[in-house]
Image (cartoon, rainbow, N blue to C red):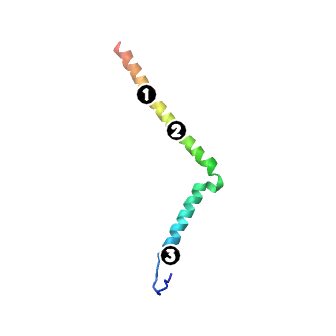
Amino acid sequence: MKSYLGRESNHGLRFNLRKSLMNQFFEWLAMGGYSLYVWPAYGLVCVVLGMNILGIKWQRTRTRKKLQRWFKR
């Protein structure tokens, strides 16, 4: 790409590439118009997985305490 001074310049190409990548990213975020359905579903999955992990940890500590009390008898 030639600038007005006649020198080669890649600034326009770089800018267009960045703009193109940002547009692609925002199109991906929009999920083809279904983002209002897709992103809450992802959020719900993350919440449920987090609750499962915390539930397992709480159950583990509770079971350990019960076993420690049982073996102390």
Q: Residue furthest right?
A: 33
Determine crowd level at label 1: few under 14, some 14-19, many 20+ residues with C-alpha closer than 10 A.
few
Which residue is tagged 1?
60
CA–CA distance in space, label 2 to label 1: 17 Å
Q: Which amino acid does label 3 sit on?
A: Gly
CA–CA distance in space, label 3 to label 1: 59 Å
- Which residue is pictured at 63% across the width and 47% down the height? 37
Q: What residue type is labelled 1?
A: Arg
Q: Residue furthest top?
A: 73
Among the two numbered marks 2 and 3 on one chain, the one whose residue lies closer to the N terminus: 3
- Which residue is pictured at 61% across the width and 54% down the height? 31
Which residue is tagged 3?
12
Secondary-structure class at tag 3: helix
Residue 50 in percent (x, y) is at: 50, 38
Determine crowd level at label 2: few under 14, some 14-19, many 20+ residues with C-alpha closer than 10 A.
few
Secondary-structure class at tag 2: helix
Residue 61 vertical position relative to residue 21 in the rendered view, above or below: above
Residue 39 in percent (x, y) is at: 58, 48
CA–CA distance in space, label 2 to label 3: 45 Å
Lateral position of residue 64 relative to residue 27, left or right: left
Which residue is tagged 2?
49
The answer to which image quadrant residue 62 occupies is top left
Lateral position of residue 3 relative to residue 64, left or right: right
